Image (cartoon, rainbow, N blue to C red):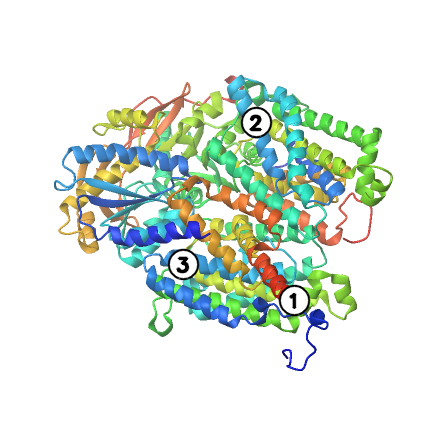
Amino acid sequence: MTQGPDAPRGAAPAARPPRPSLLASPWPRLALVAAAFAAWYFVFPSALSLGITLMLLAGWATAWDLLGGWTGQASLGHAAFVGLGAYTVGVTAANFDLAPWWAALLAMAAAALLALLWGRLTFGLRGAYFVLSTIAIAEILRLVAINERRLTGGAVGLFIFDLQEPFGLDLFSRHVEFWFSLGYLLLVLVVVALVTRGRLGYQMRAVREDEASAQAAGINPVAVKSWAFVLSAALTALGGCLYGVFLSALQPQPLFELHLSVRIALVAIIGGRGTLFGPLVGAALITLAAELFRTTFAQANLLIYGLLIVLVVLFMPRGIMGELERRVVRRRYAKSARG
Amino acid sequence: MEGLAPFLQNLSGGLLIGGIYALIGVGLSLIFGVMRVINFAHGEFVMLGMYLAIVLFVQLGLDPYVSLLIAAPAGFLVGMVVQRLVIARLVDIPGDSTLLVTLGLGLVISNVLFLVFGAEPKSIYLPYATRTVMLGGIRLPVAQLIAGGVTLVLITGLWLLLTRTELGRAVRATAQNRLGAELVGIDTPRIHALVFGVGMALAMAAGVILAPLLFAIPTAGASYTLKAFVVTVLGGLGSVPGAIGGGLLLGVVEFMGASYLSSGYRDAYGLFAFLLVLLLRPEGLFGRTVKRV
Amino acid sequence: MRRLLVPFLVALMASGAATALAQESVKVGVITSLTGRFAEFGEQHQAGIQAALEDVNAAGGVNGVPLEVVYEDDTSEVNAALTAAETLVNQNLPLVMGAYSSSITNPLAQYFTRQQRPFLVFTSGDDAITRPGSDWVFRLNQPSYAYADVLFGVFDALNEQHGDGYLRTIVTIHGNGAFEVSVADAVDEIAAQRGYTVLQRQDYDQSGADFRPILNRFKSLNPDVVFMVSYAADSVALMRQIAEVGLDAKVFAGGAAGFALPNFIEGSGPAADYVYTATMWTKDVPYPGAQELDDRLQAILGRTPSYHAAQAYAAIITAADVLSRAASFSPADVREALLATDMPDTVYGPISFSDYAGYRNQASLPAVAEQVVNGEFVTVYVNGEVVNEMLDTPAWTER
């Protein structure tokens, strides 16, 4: 309800804080994201790989944010789900000639199950303990992927040679992969938008802000965290499936590395935790900067990465989108206060 | 492998490497105990120590065990500066911002090392450090014995500092109750800077004594950070004696696991132990039973 | 942000436009690690390429047109490598070559196969790149099998000298990267064929490791041969710790990578002596111009070149030869020319691509074995022949 003509002007104007527009309706912005990437396809037809890596990283970071940002349980083990997704497609295609869409469903189910168990084990732990346990579990999974050769091909890895073609689309074509990645990114954004605006979203934020109070208000924190983790894991694994097809040669080192987990988390943090578009902004900034540095500054890319994180945490603790939102909210608030 | 001698050989090997793990872990645990900060750049400081020892050795021909006298104070100073400039700004902010900032710091350090020294592994060749001593059928490497001795001296020194001095009392008071400590007039920001400095001094000292033993690679810091975590969690986060026990235990578990089970899972044994302790006894194996974190 | 983005976008568009310009040179693409973990090898590659371009262009380039190399840095990471590959494919270069690490080259090979563009591998050793391989992937360097094969040649030769049964049992220790595992697999395979017994095979994770528990275990097995496959840091650590633990064997064999580099000897000190190593090329190989090339590479690099530089040299002269024979620069014609390659006298040995032993489009060059004698690499075994005396390995207590 907006202020009616007969509402008393100037009297208690700040009684109802205005809804921040960035939270209000994500749909126009989502359409904008879709349009921007669709434009990328036509403007930079020779940089599709870059677009794909960007969108996948953005999708993972957005999915990570469900748990790490909205629910406040930072994980440094999400590479495990990327690896799980990629390997599920690879293993099932090589051994059972399973269609990739069934493999994707299977990967998501497996990731959800893993997240459920993982969460059961670790949600009793708080803060640093939880972060440390995610690193440990992801590291153990990496060692399993390296050592269990019959399943994963071990260090030599696994190759994806043939995949069944959905609607006659060649999944190995960068063009097809580009649109699939865009679809994936939009799917993650829509899911996160819906979840965070719904009941679960409020519960997640309540748990993040104060677990004890949330519990007092009748919220079961472990259940809420588990849901967030399961959704986050399943969505990350789906992106992992696409990444597996993109690489078509899977090896444990790049897929399960701590490095990838850290990157997923940091991209979300730089962009802004607990904001819908923050992780995307972070991923875009980092990926484009890295590509720029690759061709010009070369040596220094990871250094810049580290510096960026230190600076963001020190001076923009809410991340880029977080600070931006706060400013918009403040301005509106000031405006409405002035009447 | 059967028999008692090989077993003792493995046990001594595990204990000696565990001593170094303990030295790394103690710093991390101390910082957490006093400041409630998990230092994700801890392993990078170990690497910094290693490279410092290598530079001093190559440029000035300084024996690494002599350069301990430079590395430890240097680590102390760098730690103080880092604490004052970066971490002090974040200590009062709840959440994981200190964790993230130290993670970023670690990336900065490892990449600066990489830019300066390149990816090529570097090490120090000390003829006398590759020798071994036989002791009742057990072969003890000289470099590891020296490392064990240095570790013992440093940890004893730390223990004396914490328990026998006024400063140590202030540190312990800050760890137990920061507000209370401030009320009785302890300058807790200064204590924090000091503790971070001591932690970094220990980390860099560990790096120096590792230099003749292992290779320095700019990116190896992360694995030392992980080891330090395992050590501290095994012993109980924040407990200094616990970290010593945890370090020795991790060394033995890894060594025995690699020797009697599959070596490919060497790092996993420590992590399994870590998870088990985290789940069953989060206060650590050697910690007093306190309320669950 | 905008200040970064605008030049970036301009560069992206310019890269598309540049190909439209008239060709005053023939360009080939090279993807290698100029930065990141593998930058050391990228430098070696650059040195080899520089030397090769001088030679090729002094001899008239590609049918009178100078040859030029377009470098793309993979920053030692697979994503960047794939982005780089796409850039090169979109520039319609007739031939692309690369990369150093097998974990990067494998996905690249898959990509070029899908794109149906010829791809020439010149350093990555992982067997899987050309076994099973594809129509579009060619490799001139020896696959990982060759690293094990040449050392078994040495073992056979030693058995011949000392009488049968001198060497019989083997223990293997290797890193868990793709390349090391692939060599260790070859050890198992060849040992079974030639009547050796692999007593135990152990792998380890990551570098900077402590090998003593594994070595203690090996000691109780009393093996004739200790077969090691690892990268630079690990190879030095291994030999130092073997000396320290007192693990004796008749032969210490280093299956490539770390053991063949000059800093293996620098780092290990006297512990490196008597170790046999497999390498892909040395200045002593019986091919024309080897010594001169080594001197030139030394001058370019300012330090001892590794075999990777010679491989890059070979890649460029092969590219020049292929492109001057190709009917056109279309992918199909370049592929035909690659298949018809027959260069019997290169400094890297005779280069031609064939299918054998499960490999596809693989050059079949033997590796070289060296032994460390008094802190120097001595070439002892080339092309199935012993070319220098092979010294017995004394016990550690007698050194």
Asked if residue C102 is positioned above or below residue B146 in the image, the reply reads: below
The chain identifier of the residue carrying mark 1 reads A
**Hey, what amino acid is under mark 3?**
Gly
Q: Are marks 3 and 1 on the same chain?
A: yes
Mark 2–mark 1 CB contact (< 8 Å): no
**Residue A294 vs residue C304, the one in the foreground:** A294
Percent position of residue B42, x then y: 63, 39
Q: Secondary structure at mark 2?
A: helix
Identified at 32% across, 52% down, the residue is: C87
Q: Is residue A24 left or right of residue A54?
A: right
Tell me the residue that label 3 is attached to: A51
Q: Which mark is residue B52?
A: 2
Estimate how packed mark 2 is, as few (under 14), some (14 to 19) or many (20 or more) residues with alpha carbons within 10 Å: many
Mark 3–mark 1 CB contact (< 8 Å): no
Q: Are marks 2 and 1 on the same chain?
A: no
Which residue is the extreme one toward the right?
B184
Asked if residue C391 is positioned above or below residue B21 in the image, the reply reads: above
**Hey, what amino acid is under mark 1?**
Arg
Q: Quadrant of the N terminus of chain B?
A: top right
Q: Is residue B8 visible?
A: no
**Residue C288 vs residue B204, the one in the foreground:** B204
Which of the 4 quarters of the picture holds residue B2? top right
Percent position of residue C104, x then y: 39, 48
- Whole-angstrom CA distance, mark 2 to mark 1, is 60 Å
Estimate how packed mark 1 is, as few (under 14), some (14 to 19) or many (20 or more) residues with alpha carbons within 10 Å: few
Tell me the residue that label 1 is attached to: A338
**Residue B127 vs residue B116, the one in the foreground:** B116
